[in-house]
Image: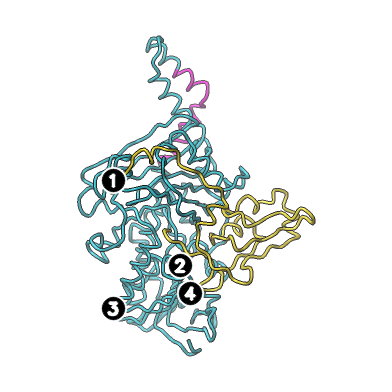
Amino acid sequence: MSIDVREYLKPHKALSLEERLGLVKRRFADESHITVDQDAFRADPTKAVLFMCPAQVFKLNGEDGSCIVNYEDCLECGTCQVARRYTTWNNPQGGYGVTYHYG
Amino acid sequence: MSSDERFEVVIVGAGPAGAAAALALAREGVEVLVLERGDFPGAKNLFGGILYTSVVNELIPEFWETAPVERHIVNRRWMALDEDTQVGLDLKSAKFDVPPYNNTFTALRAKWDRWFAEQAEEAGAMIICETNVEEMILDKGKVVGVRTGRDDGDVYADVVILAEGANALLAERAGFRPQMAPKNRVNAVKEVIALPPEIIEDRFHLEGRQGMALEYFGGAVKGTVGSGFIYTNHDSLSVGVGCLIEEFLRLEMAPYEMLDWFKAHPMVAPLLRGGETVEYATKMIPEDSYDSLSDLYEDGLLLIGDCAGLVNPSIHHEGTNLAMASGVAAAEAVLAAREANDYSKARLATYRERLEESWVMKDLKRYRDTVHFLLDNPEMVSDYPDLTIRLIRRYFTIDDTPKDDVLRELWKTIRDEVSFFKMARQMWRARKTML
């Protein structure tokens, strides 16, 4: 099979984060493996977990100022609990969570 | 597993550290169980993409004949960027094009880790996947086994080897290592970007299985303590950034935004043309200083690999080979303890002694202050690379200015922008902490 070089001179198409998360194979557990101390989250002036998570698992609930945890999107790096100790991260149950194809 | 399951050694984690320990122990006839939480070894594992292989080549001579490595690196480039300019050091050698290929290969962990763990399995180690270890079982302060998430999931052992990775939950919660913190953990994000091998070889001036590693500093990552990288795999590129978590917190910036910024840089974007992102992944990297490492051995317990904090945080960015070296050292210590039938902390101290005598701890000592130095001297990753780029660019900018005047201008720029004694002191410290 010959390669059409022109195909590879076009700009790389950058994907949105949602599109990128969609590329990762995940098996969802019923329960969240991440918990947030909501009082401590409310008291965090920068709400660091909102931007720090590479998968943007944490969202602000505009109504009550609480933190929503979309644990299904988690890529299991553990950065949240290092950035802010008010998050508690546990390994998802064995066999659940992320399976990388390349890694 | 029934509750009276017992092995001589239980290893938590089937990454490079755990698999190396399992391989070395199984070859000596030790009964080893490896517990892995992923679907297969490597399923949850990630690195930038360079595998240093001096330890692998000792364990499995000429592994490249059969192992799923991507390319051997013949060309390395280290570059500083500002917003529109690149200045760098380029090293390419035909000496790296012959076995053992400078012990430097690109790899993808879902393939590599799986293969490496299979070598341990073939040597006689038992690997059980989809199994999460929830805690260690202690008896009078001695680790005697692990509690898994399976029904009747307690497993007992003479010695437990923790190889749980950078997110060292078990070790930290049991108090066997210092707390992970924003100043000792990097967050790295990476995309695998597919391209045909012919395009990669043409674009990066490679032949056959030759590969290239490009590392970017300074403005590439907004002047933070961190770097960006492009590594050539066989039919894809590994493209990513890694910065201290402290830096993301300071900038209030998401890691994927840093990656997007890097990928869109005018010096980077042309290298990615036509590539299709096929995976997005992230991991933490431990950059614990030698001075903050825990003992790494307890009664009935050894810590190896990332969870022990064994990563060289300097420009060398070595992790997996330290992981494998520590796995082998742990195996040797366990064999000596087995001989004496004594798995006490005092007996297992030989593990640490082996590491201290080897390049592993010698290198960690050499770079014990690298991260602190960079955090305390942010000019090293922001102002100085920027200034260097400007000076070199001006020196080679062609206009009608006489060269004498250009040189005067350059010296004036340096005098205006740099405190001589401050910089002299920093360069002296940099030589000691970073070289």
Q: Is residue B2 on the magenta stretch?
A: no
Is disc 1 on the same chain as disc 2?
no
Q: Amino acid at mark 2?
A: Leu
> Of circles 2 and 1, which is in front?
1
Give the CA distance from mark 4 to mark 3.
27 Å
- Which residue carries the number 1 mark? A2
Residues rendered magenta in the picture: B410-431
Give the CA distance from mark 4 to mark 2.
26 Å
Q: Amino acid at mark 1?
A: Ser
At 28% from the left edge and 39% from the top edge, which residue is drawn?
A: B205
Q: Chain of mark 3?
A: B
Give the CA distance from mark 3 to mark 2.
23 Å
Q: Which mark is residue B28?
A: 3
Q: Chain of mark 1?
A: A
> Of circles 4 and 3, which is in front?
4
Disc 4, disc 3: CB below 8 Å?
Answer: no
Give the CA distance from mark 1 to mark 3.
51 Å
> Of circles 4 and 1, which is in front?
1
- Which residue carries the number 4 mark? B130
Q: Secondary structure at mark 2?
A: loop
Foreground residue among B65 and B383: B65
Chain A color in figure: yellow
Q: Chain of mark 2?
A: B
Vertically, is B189 above or below B407? below
Q: Secondary structure at mark 4?
A: loop
- Which residue carries the number 2 mark? B296
Which circle's residue, 4 or 3, is located before the other in the chain? 3
Foreground residue among B364 and B155: B155
Residue B133 seen by the camera: yes
Is disc 1 on the same chain as disc 4?
no
